[in-house]
Amino acid sequence: MTKLQVRAFLYNLGCFAILFISFRYLVEQYTNLSGFWIPMTAFIAGTLLSPKFQAAKTKDGEKLFMSWLFIKGIKEIG
């Protein structure tokens, strides 16, 4: 794995973890769900709402790209 692929993986993991923990707390506090349904709901919400990062090779070299539900199109990250 290249440096940008590792960075994309860590960004994906970090964003998902932040959203998963946040949604897990919110679901536990503000809904009547119990047991297995709390982490399952948080997992689905985190998966759908977290941004996606990917390293791709272009003619200018390898670059990091981001796609997110709330941003139109694909953005190049530094």
Image (cartoon, rainbow, N blue to C red):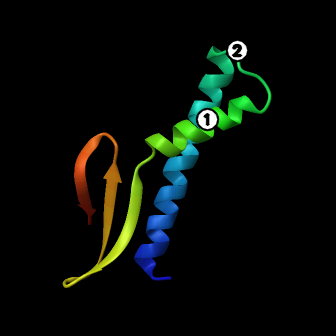
Against 72, residue 1 (above or below) is below
Amino acid under disc 2? Asn
Disc 1 target residue? 42
Q: Is residue 72 left or right of residue 39?
A: left
The 10 Å Cα crowd at callout 2, few under 14, some 14 to 19, many 20 or more, is few
Q: Position of residue 70 (x, y in %)?
A: 30, 39
The foreground one among 3 and 20 is: 20
Q: Residue at x 53, y 41 (%)?
A: 46
Against 19, residue 57 (above or below) is below
Disc 2 target residue? 32
Q: Position of residue 47 (x, y in %)?
A: 52, 45
The 10 Å Cα crowd at callout 1, few under 14, some 14 to 19, many 20 or more, is many
Residue 19 visible from this viewpoint: no
Residue 11 visible from this viewpoint: yes
Q: CA distance from mark 2 to mark 1?
A: 14 Å
Q: Residue at x 71, y 20 (%)?
A: 33
Number of dots carrying numbers: 2
The quadrant of the rendering that contains the C terminus is: bottom left
Q: In which image quadrant can residue 23 be found? A: top right
